[in-house]
Amino acid sequence: MPTPPQIISDPTAMRDMVRRSQRSGMTVGVVPTMGALHEGHLSLVRASTRAYDETVVTVFVNPTQFGPGEDFDRYPRTLNSDVGKLAPLGVNYVFAPASDAIYAADHSTYVEPPSVALPLEGECRPGHFRGVATIVLKLFNIVPADVAIFGQKDYQQSLVIRRMVAELDIPVDVHVEPTVREADGLALSSRNAYLSTNQRTQALAISRALRQATAMYAAGEKSASPILAAMRKILADAGIDEIDYVAIADRETLQPCETIHDDQAVALIAAHVGSTRLIDNMFL
Amino acid sequence: MPTPPQIISDPTAMRDMVRRSQRSGMTVGVVPTMGALHEGHLSLVRASTRAYDETVVTVFVNPTQFGPGEDFDRYPRTLNSDVGKLAPLGVNYVFAPASDAIYAADHSTYVEPPSVALPLEGECRPGHFRGVATIVLKLFNIVPADVAIFGQKDYQQSLVIRRMVAELDIPVDVHVEPTVREADGLALSSRNAYLSTNQRTQALAISRALRQATAMYAAGEKSASPILAAMRKILADAGIDEIDYVAIADRETLQPCETIHDDQAVALIAAHVGSTRLIDNMFL
């Protein structure tokens, strides 16, 4: 049984720990999370502990990435249970700061995220990626790890972070790990906890629509519009009628594709099931 | 005679050099400049070489901090002469990147600077501090020095950088060194090179107005408005009629002061002499 992780709340102490490890020649991976950890997060953590000498998991529900009326207040906060899940995995540090250690009351410096933040989530959640980019930059400065691991589930987020890292010369490698799904296809998400049994069944239509897209593409359909129509029909048949977007887009720019080229497109969905907003994506 | 500085243009090579020095236990200071070095810059460089084991001077005319119609094209570029001035000072590295090593053609990630960027220069030069904050953050990531040295001449810039560093958790100490002046009071600036002999004489009114402010305050005047009136009269008498601002402001927030408290205020001027825009400031 590995040593349980050390829980650190002070940013300066956290940075000193990482630097000490690096000075002694160790590599460090960081997995930024908002807590409420599930198997998806744990797969990112395992990817880190497998490949790097030390692993830091950050747990911080970042207020600046939630819009007015979004679920900041009800977002699950389960630090003790999170640490319990990380303990068997060989995580070295959990960085769990208080909110005021991260944002002073008069905080006013933000990252204006790269243009890949503009479509899709950027249109539905104005300011979301500004908050994401800002907290991730801050965390990279507090936890100056060699590598940061993110999940493909938040695909546009992973692009925003990759571009930000490149364009601001941030000295970290960004790795993106595949989405983890339940046996029936539902992508793991901390927000699945909000779903009733019926809503959970309804939510399966999202991954079903994405699988339909990959199947049609694999069967030779290279035009986006019939695939998008089939995806929308699957959502409608399941009674999902509040759809933020159903898209087939370039994997790097997220600009919509009309004709799909090999290894260049991703299908993405954002939709509301009851009061819960879910997102998912698959490569075509 | 010290070894001449090594000139580095590649960001990754630059970062590796700084890290190697730090791993061997050395402290590193960085002096970010746009080149066209004068005694003001050299005083920052000497402050670094005196206090830290190694010193990096960056030379980059940053396009994103110039507005449309400003002097980006005519800004002096004098790298050979700059390196000549640095050679006797014991500078270890000059980082002089090509523009496309810093900004890709599709660059779109910026720093939204702290609120102290909004008044004064922020009103006169929209976008200026966004460009400054972005390039300084990038340079801190490329040259991860222990300490960065800036001049008080660009006082608002020094506040913007200090607040950005604090709010984004950037691991660097920011030091601000006093403004260097000619014997007759003119603050050194790369833009003084644009002034004709007559304009240079006219420009002296700026430092004269600031000295008048410090003299009135030292003589007991605690109200800003008579001091501002005296400053404006000195500029007007010298024929300087295109004034961007004459201000007495809080040293931390740059909000205007009506009543001046000890060690809390700074007097600032921005004005045009011919086609040259000059700024200067003094603490009250």
Image (spheres, coloured by chain):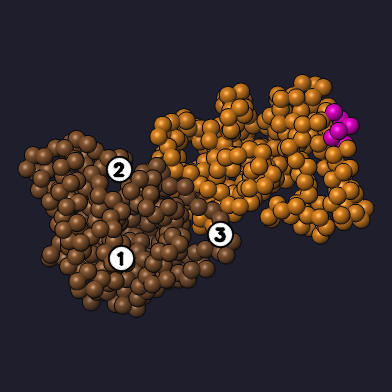
Chain colours: A brown, B orange
Percent across and percent down for residue A169 are 42, 44
| SS at mark 3 in the image | loop
| SS at mark 1 in the image | strand
Q: Badge 3: how crowded within 10 Å, few (<14), some, or many (20+)?
A: some
Closer to the camera, A9 or A254?
A254
In 3D space, how far apart are the residues under numbered discs 1 and 3 (Cα atoms)? 30 Å
Callouts 2 and 3 in the same chain: yes
The residue carrying mark 3 is A107
Callouts 2 and 1 in the same chain: yes
The stretch in magenta equals B234-239
Closer to the camera, A41 or A28?
A41
- Name the subunit of mark 3: A
Tags 1 and 3 in contact by the CB under 8 Å rule? Answer: no
- Whether residue A82 is visible, yes or no, is yes
For residue A81, above or below residue A30: below
- If you read the primary sequence from the N terminus, does the residue marked by circle 2 or circle 1 appear first? 2
Residue type indicated by callout 2:
Leu
The residue carrying mark 2 is A254
- Whether residue A147 is visible, yes or no, is no
Q: Quadrant of residue A260?
A: top left
Q: Badge 1: how crowded within 10 Å, few (<14), some, or many (20+)?
A: some
- Discs 2/3, front: 2
Residue type indicated by callout 1:
Thr
